[in-house]
Image (tube, grey):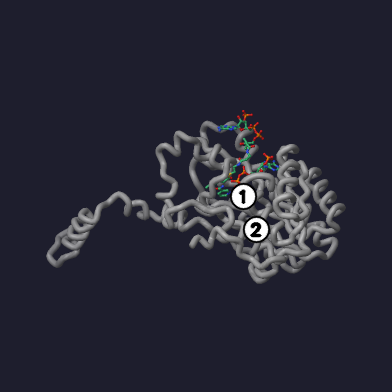
Amino acid sequence: MSQYKEPMLRDGSLKGKTFVVTGGGTGLGRSMSKYFLELGAQVVICSRKKDVIEEAALTLEKETGGRCLGLPCDVRKYEEVESILQQAVATFGQVNGLVNNAAGNFISPTERLSHRAFDTIVDIVLKGTYNCSLSFGKYWIANNIKANVLNIVTTYSWVGSGYVVPSACAKSGVLALTRSLAVEWGKYGIRFNAIAPGPFPTPGAWDRLFPQDFLDKLEIEQRIPVGRVGEHQELANLAAYLMSDYSAYINGDVITIDGGEWMRNGGEFSWIGDMISPDMWDRVEEMIKSKNSKGSTS
Ligand code: HXC
Ligand code: NAP
């Protein structure tokens, strides 16, 4: 049975909470928002495209019976971030959670990028995250509200990655912010954690990172020890747990959900297993042992 495709938390686990999810109208942001609503939270979703975000909020309300507000906002602009916070408070009375999920990314050799392209990605991912964290943090501290922040990073936040260098730089910065503010603002009752997903198919990521020419050459599942990509519900389960009070003692951590992908591909020799047959391993073992045997000169 594929239990990971099922909702995990108890009904009402997020009742009384109001969360803002940036980039909540599409992809993983939408899946997390949907589950937060199912668990009783009120959710504000925001992104740049007004029509997309408003339609998403209406659909999510219909699907879940919850209360969802869709607001246009470019997280790169501090005044727009402040404005959605004010609208969220005016509508729901209070905000006590933030998911920094909005991102921009595309795959490209770095030498092909203009400085504007680099800025675009870093500004959405890193500046967007610190704009929201700073604006919401000041509000929580001034109003003595206990709160919870979840940042969506990637597994290359700590190992880096060629061909997505602006994203790697920005996500590393987001991870540093997560750990730093978890310590600094813990005293105010504000927790910061991160999730590092491996591949979870979404049109936003697949169109920009795995175009068809790549998919023709690459079997993503083969890179992942558990042999499959992620299911949105399993990420939503983890996000809801981290945004709930069940995780009250988790602060400053990053939880990887990638089926073991980065560990396999980050290890110096991990890739070799798929290329060498059992017969060849027998020969390799013999060769190595013969070099070890007494009398060997090399
Ligand atoms: C080289 C490119 C490019 C490309 C854009 N640019 N695409 N350069 N190769 N493929 C350059 C443009 O020429 C321009 O530079 C600059 O980048 C800004 O482009 P705009 O189109 O003007 O920017 P904008 O309209 O703000 O769009 C932002 C965007 C777009 C990031 C380029 O893709 C977007 O809206 N993305 C949002 C959603 C998204 O990216 N989702 C994926 C998240 S997945 P010049 O010099 O010409 O002005 C993820 C992790 C996945 O983050 C990990 C998977 C395992
Ligand atoms: P997605 O659907 O493209 O989500 C990105 C969202 O960010 C979109 O809704 C987009 O909406 C919004 N956005 C972009 N720029 C914005 C800005 N300046 N201001 C406000 N909103 C903005 O892609 P996804 O795959 O679901 O990605 C969601 C998160 O998961 C990202 O942080 C990504 O890095 C992370 N992630 C994804 C994967 C994966 O395999 N899918 C793996 C690792 C990490 P607008 O265009 O309307 O602004």
Q: Is mark 1 within 8 Å of ligand 2?
A: yes
Question: Which of the two marks, 2 or 1, is nearer to us in this view?
Answer: 1
Count of numbered marks: 2
Amino acid under disc 1: Leu
Taking 13 as reference, is 121 above or below it? above
Q: Which residue is mark 1?
A: 28
- Which quadrant of the structure image shows residue 104? top right
User: At x 68% / y 53%, what residue is drawn?
Assistant: 34
Separation (CA) of disc 2 from disc 1: 19 Å
Amino acid under disc 2: Thr
- Pointer 2 or 1: first along the chain: 1
Q: Secondary structure at mark 1?
A: helix
Q: Secondary structure at mark 2?
A: helix
Question: Of the numbered discs in the image, which one, if any, rests on residue 40?
Answer: none
Could one spot residue 248 in this view of the protein?
yes
> Mark 2 packing: few (<14 Cα in 10 Å), some, or many (20+)?
many
Name the quarter where the C terminus is drawn. bottom left
Q: Is mark 2 within 8 Å of ligand 2?
A: no
64 left or right of 165 in image: right
Q: Position of residue 164 (x, y in %)?
A: 53, 42
Q: Which residue is mark 2?
A: 178
Q: Position of residue 200 (x, y in %)?
A: 54, 49
Taking 41 as reference, is 154 above or below it? above
Q: Position of residue 16 (x, y in %)?
A: 78, 64
